[in-house]
Image (cartoon, rainbow, N blue to C red):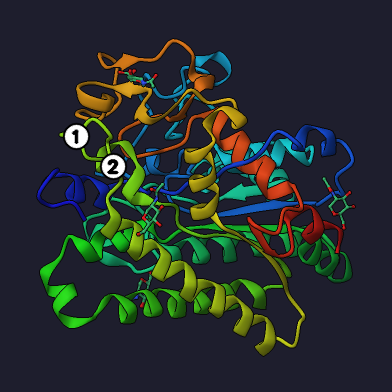
Amino acid sequence: MPKNKTPSLAIWLLFLGLLWFDSFPGLEAAAGKLSSIPGLYVFGDSLVDAGNNNYLPISIAKANYPRNGVDFPKKKATGRFSNGKNAADVIAEKFGLPLPPPYRSLKGPLKDKKRESAALTGVNFASGGAGIFNSSDRKHGQSIPLSHQVDDWLSIHDEVTGQIRPAEAQVHLSKSLFIVVIGSNDLFDYYGSFKMREKNDPRQYTQSMADKLKEQMKRIYKTGARRFLVVGVAQIGCIPGNRDTDSDLHECDEEANRSCSLYNEALVKMLQQLKQELRNSMSYSYFDNFKSLQDINSNPARYGFTNVTSACCGSGKLNAAMHCQLIAKCCPDRTKYLFWDRFGHPTEAASRTFVDLMLSNDSQFSSPLSLTQLVSS
Ligand SMILES: *[C@@H]1O[C@H](CO)[C@@H](O)[C@H](O)[C@H]1NC(C)=O
Ligand SMILES: *[C@@H]1O[C@H](CO)[C@@H](O)[C@H](O)[C@H]1NC(C)=O
Ligand SMILES: *[C@@H]1O[C@H](CO)[C@@H](O)[C@H](O)[C@H]1NC(C)=O
Ligand SMILES: *[C@@H]1O[C@H](CO)[C@@H](O)[C@H](O)[C@H]1NC(C)=O
């Protein structure tokens, strides 16, 4: 991490999940013709959190205040780390499903009806700041780590099997889409801690991330899930807060970029092995977020963006000196910016672009299947 440039960034990033998505224009043509999925279940960090952290009493990793949500229906700050919808929401829309509500919003005695219906159409378990490992933010109540998100899924799974007959439930679960967007916070933890770096070299650490993710995916698989969309980590060296603000070129942080590549390599291998171990009884689409961000960075106009270096909402150089809040500067045309805030959360326009790329059958970005192929397999 760029300790020399932005010493406090790693600390902030500990608490906020970062991941990206991208998509591409060709996608609109495909919309409406997509095979159906009965339900959408979302695991991950702030790239897909829809408001779970609002329910964590002492977490500071929240986004339920303006100007977040400025382009969300009713201009509502829901807890999403964006001006509008995130990639998981956009995927739900593409498949004609309701936006999966945050799991935590479904708890409590008066929520029975809402929980029953969401259990079947989809629930979002993601939490800003969450990692694959429990890590420090778990201890400090800042976020809901992946293992705990999977625990939450088990209770929704009980709800599903309580509502429909076993044979139906099996079909429902095997056709539903399970999205996993996580890993950036574990990388931030690693680069922010001398102790962790002393104990493991980057290769060992990123391998153990992939191993741990495999365990959690197996737990989800055991409940009947068969279709997974797994998103790799993006180039965290290229988010506004990690770029070089002292040079006119605003270069990306290469070291941060490299750690992302290492993890993605381990992730791709892990997924191949997992599928083999499960005798091909699961299928997945791995989306290469790193490559998609690189492509957008090098061809912004092709994707309709004019600004791919600065945050839309913030202040100071690259609008990345301060986080996005009520008194921050907010760019007037949010559809032209790739990044919403200094942490590199995508704007809604960027999330739509990422999802378009996921749905396009471009093997540069998805392997072994695109999202479209995954849901028609
Ligand atoms: C992480 O937390 C879960 C419960 O939320 C626990 O079961 C698990 O053992 C923890 N893992 C580690 C490595 O501490
Ligand atoms: C990020 O760094 C990697 C090398 O670590 C480089 O290949 C890549 O081009 C960088 N990304 C951008 C957008 O400059
Ligand atoms: C990108 O946005 C920032 C902040 O709004 C602005 O200062 C900068 O000039 C913009 N760059 C381009 C290339 O439009
Ligand atoms: C992608 O592949 C699927 C299945 O092979 C096909 O039905 C669909 O038309 C393709 N979509 C695009 C945009 O090429």
Residue 214 percent location from the top left of the image:
52, 77
Residue that appears at 82% across and 36% down? 31
Residue 140 percent location from the top left of the image:
21, 56
- Report helix, strand or loop for mark 1: loop
For the residues labelled 1 and 2, say whether their Cβ atoms are less than 8 Å apart: yes
Label 2: few (<14), some (14–19) or many (≥20) C-alpha neighbours in 10 Å: some
Q: Is residue 331 visible?
A: yes
Q: Is mark 1 within 8 Å of ligand 2?
A: no
Residue carrying label 1: 247
Residue that appears at 25% across and 30% down? 320
Judge whether 68 appears above or below 250 on screen. Answer: above
Label 1: few (<14), some (14–19) or many (≥20) C-alpha neighbours in 10 Å: few
Q: Is residue 224 left or right of residue 84?
A: right
Residue 41 percent location from the top left of the image:
64, 54
Please count the marks in the image: 2
Q: Is residue 124 left or right of residue 309?
A: right
**What's the amino acid at mark 2?**
Glu
Q: Nearer the viewer, residue 192 or 39?
A: 192
Residue carrying label 2: 251
